[in-house]
Structures are given as C-alpha cells and as structure tokens.
Amino acid sequence: MKNSNTEYKGNIKISVFVEILIYFLIGTVVIGFVSWVILATASTQTVLNQKNMQAENIFDDLDGYFAQYRSMDYVFEYWIKNMDSMEVEYDTNEISAAKNHEFNLRNPGFIFNSASTDDIEALSEEDRKFYAEVIYNRCVMRLNMIRKAFDIEYIYCLAADEKFENAIYLLSGSDGSRPRSSKFGDFYTLGTTIKLDEKQKNTLMDTLSNSYHMAESVGFVDRYETLTDINGYHIFLGLTYSTSVVQHEIADQTRHGALFTVLFMLIFAAISLSLIRNYVLVPLKEVQSSVENYMINKDSEEVVKRLTKIKQRDEIGMLAHSFSNMALTIDSYIDEVQKVTADKERIDTELNVATRIQENMLPCDFPPFPDRKEFDIYAKMDPAKEVGGDFYDFFFVDDDHLAIVIADVSGKGVPAALFMVIAKTLLKIRTQSNRGTPADILYDVNNTLCSGNKVEMFVTVWLAVINLKTGEGIAANAGHEHPILRHKDGQFEPVMYKHSHPLGMLENAKFREHEFTLMPGDSVFVYTDGVTEAENTEHELFGMDRCVTALNKCTSNDPETLIKTVRKDIDEFVGEADQFDDITMLSYFYKGDK
C-alpha cells in the first residue's frame, strides 16, 4: 500500500494572496489596455464633437457679427471686384481707426452698421473704398481675436465660384507671428485664390446643402459653414484645427480616462484584496493550520474548537464545518479500527492456537512407527483457511491391525474444525474399542453425531482396518471420494463402488463395507474433494483423471514422494487462483509381514 502521507515537493511556495494579487495586477493591466483602446476611440469622437460644437459657436458669433452690417453682401462683392486695389491692414487696428476718423469727417452722420446699399452707392468712389477697407479691417480684427482666444490654426472666409473650381480667400485670422501671403501654410491675404481639389469641392458642396461635418486633410481638420450667396459666388466661413493639437487633446483625454480607470481598479483591487484576505484567506489559513495541527497531534477537540470560530455561511464555512466533522469521524473511526484490530489480533492469536492444536491432533511425525516394517505411510493436510474441516488419522487397533481414516467435514473454518475434532475423536475411540467392523463403527459414530446436530453439519469418511500380517482389510465409505489403488508393478486406478450416507445426516443409517486384500508392493491413495475440485483461473476442475495421471507420473513407492508429486501438479494447474477448499491426501504402501 502506498503511503498516503505524501509531501508537497514544489520548489516555490506562493501564498494564495500573492496569486490573487498577481491575477489582480494582470487584470488591471489588461483592463487598462482595453480601456485605453476604448477611451482612445471615445476621446477621438468626444474631441471632434467638442471641436465641431466650438466651430458652430464661432460661426454663430461671426454670423452675428457680419449680420450687424446691413449691406454685408454688397461689401463681399466689392472685396471680390476690387481685391487688387484695396489697401487693408491685416493685424493692427491703427490704419483702420485713422480711415474711420477721416471717413466720418468727410461723411458726418454716416452709420456703418445701418448703411444700405443705396447709402453706400451715394458715396464717392474713394469713400466707398474707405468704407469697404474699414469694414474689412474690422472683420480681420474679429477673426484675429477669435483665433487667439480659441487656439485655432486657421479661421477664414472664402468665396467659391458656382462650379466649385476655385476659391478666393477674403478674410483670414492671424496672431501676427507669421506673414500673410498667397503661399500655402501662411495666413492668406485678400484675393489669394486656390484651385479646389475633389475632396475640398465635395466638402463645400456638402456644407452648402447644410450637411456639416469635420473634414480631414493632410495635417489638419477643417470645418465649414455657409454664410451667404452673392452674385456668382458662395461665401463660406471656415476654420482649421491642427491635427497634432487635436491628437494631443485626444491623448490627454485618453490618458486622464485611462488613469482614472486604472486608479479606480487599484482602489477596487485594494478593497477587494482586503476583503478577500479577511474573509477568505484568513479563514482558509486557519483551516490549513488546523489540518496540519491535526495531522501532527490527532486532536479533534482542538480542531473543532479552532474551526468553530469561523462563522461564515459560505463554502469556507462549510469546509471548516466538514473538516471538523471529518476529524471527529476519523477519531471515531480510529477508535473503532483500534478496537477491531485488537479483536482481530485476538482472533488471529486464537486461530493460530487453533491451527497448532489441529496440526497437533493430526499425526505429523513421519515415519510414525519406525519400528514397524510392514508398511510406509504419509499424509498431509493443507487447510484453505487457518483451520479446516478435513482430517486424517491412522492408529493401531491391536498389534496386527492398523486403522486408516480420512474425512471431510461440510463447511470450512472454525465450525468445520470443531465438528472435525468431535468426529475424529469419536472415530478413534470407537475404532480402538476393537468391537465390530468398520460398518459397525460408522453406525455408532453416525448416531452420536446426529444426536443434537442442530447445525446440520455432516462429515464424509473413508475408514479401513488392515491386517498387517495378511494384507486383508475391510473398508467402509460414508459418502467419501473413491480410493485409488496401485498393484505392484501396475498403474494407479480408482476403486469405484457405491457410497453410503455421510455421517451426521440420517440417524440409524446402515453402512456398506467391502473386503479387500493387499499384496506386498501395493499402494493405496486416499484424499478429500479439495484435490479433484481444485480450480484454476478458468474455473476448470483438476478432476479424477488429472489426479490419476499425476500419481502415475511417480514411479517411487515412497508415500511422501507420491503426495508431493500430486501436490506439485495441483499447484501448476491452479496457478494464480486462490485455494477454495482444504486439500488432504494420505498414501499407504504395504510391504507385507517380513
């Protein structure tokens, strides 16, 4: 049996708390990464939505600003027609203020905001130019202010022709740090004209149909809104965010969101780990410690005392309760095992004594009568259990007559052994009384065994009394196996005849007997059914034929050699199969009166 007290042989011992901590950290990293991806997508949409809303607010502001000038459409047309001749200030208000003062001196009472187209047409050509330049400067300053306030890369107003082939920049906001020109990347001057590509064309056409969205270009994100239509042109407001700025805002939002998520996860992990430690690991540690303590001390009361403190009604509480019950059960089982073991040891001791008693009851010293030269005899009994129901015996009735008995009690073990003792004793005492033949002896012993035989046991008996001088003998068979006889220089053959009833079955039963004569050199072999009914692993019986074959293998007249030969053949035939019945054999070799 393998030793169940095995020992853990791992090289590294990691506590459950550390394992859970590792899992939490891995989970935090994974959740942080997934959150980063999700937040990056959400932040992109959020920032773009914010920029879009910001653009709408700026456009609303500019639209309201332009709307305060009653004749703004006329001004747009004037800018387009006279863009090459206009003298404007882009980044300061000084010239605009001077022109505005000079214009007011020349046109007292003229109001810029409420002037109608007719009012403007009534002015001189120079004053109309002054008017358009003053309005232009005011609008540029407005765009400059908005651009600085909202950190926009570009903010502008442009006019696209009706076919959307070209666009003319009218207004362009600037912070004054970069020059204005017609070169891409600068803040454009009035009249800068660009050829629209297909993407810009589609974006402006979508804007014209009130389909507003952020349009991406190389390095920039654009937003447009329709302002007004004038003769031959569509006027648009537009602004541009730097992609790097937008991405920076997206990254900031993503970092903040991810940081918040990870921080939340760490706080959650700290709280969870604290709860797990207090309500899972500490009780588990107590259960583990109790188990180890019980393995050393086998003190179930101490285990129950410690584990009763765990009041939880979950799996851990059930585990603690189950182990407490198990410890009590094991202690009870150990007590029971110790008691059973003690009883078994006592029974084994008694059986060993009974075995020795039974062995001592059977003749076991060979040769048994070394001073008698008329015969050789040998017998052996191998019980299936500690004690058996088979027995043999041989003894002198008088100086010239030898009695031979072999018998088999029904059943096995102690009951058969007790019945065997009674039967053997009765047979020997009755035979040695030297009164009557074997049939008479069996008659008397049978009646004695039948009296009070409430367990209904019986015994088969072959009894023979042989005259050692003449070789003449009388045998009676009470339900026993047929003897096997070999005449001098012949072969062993079974002697078949009708049996009588076994002893102990039927009171007052009569027993047959027959006479025989042994010549010097003859051998008799008698046995119990444990020989012929020995089984192998295929449930085949050894049988009478194999027994006769085994006997005829042996050419020696020595009874011991004969029995050992038969026993060897039985063992080879049975193989690994267990012995089911007692095996008893007796061999008698008659030499004659010399």
Image: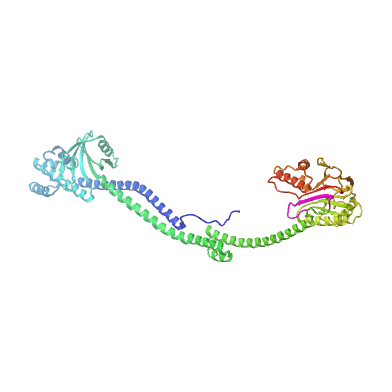
The residue lying toward the viewer, choosing from 64 and 97, is 97
Determine if residue 143 is in view: yes
- Measured from the top left, where is residue 166 in percent x and y? 20, 35
- Measured from the top left, where is residue 413 in percent x and y? 75, 54
The residue lying toward the viewer, choosing from 86 and 372, is 372
In which image quadrant can residue 417 be found? bottom right
In which image quadrant can residue 345 be found? bottom right
The residue lying toward the viewer, choosing from 420 and 470, is 470
Instruction: Work out which residue is located at the far right of the displayed protein and give it.
Output: 436
Name the residue at 70% across, 48% down: 578
Determine if residue 113 is in view: no
Left or right of 78 on screen, residue 36: right
Left or right of 584 on screen, residue 262: left
The residue lying toward the viewer, choosing from 182 and 592, is 592
Vertical placement of residue 439 versus 118, above or below: below
First to last magenta residue range: 372-389
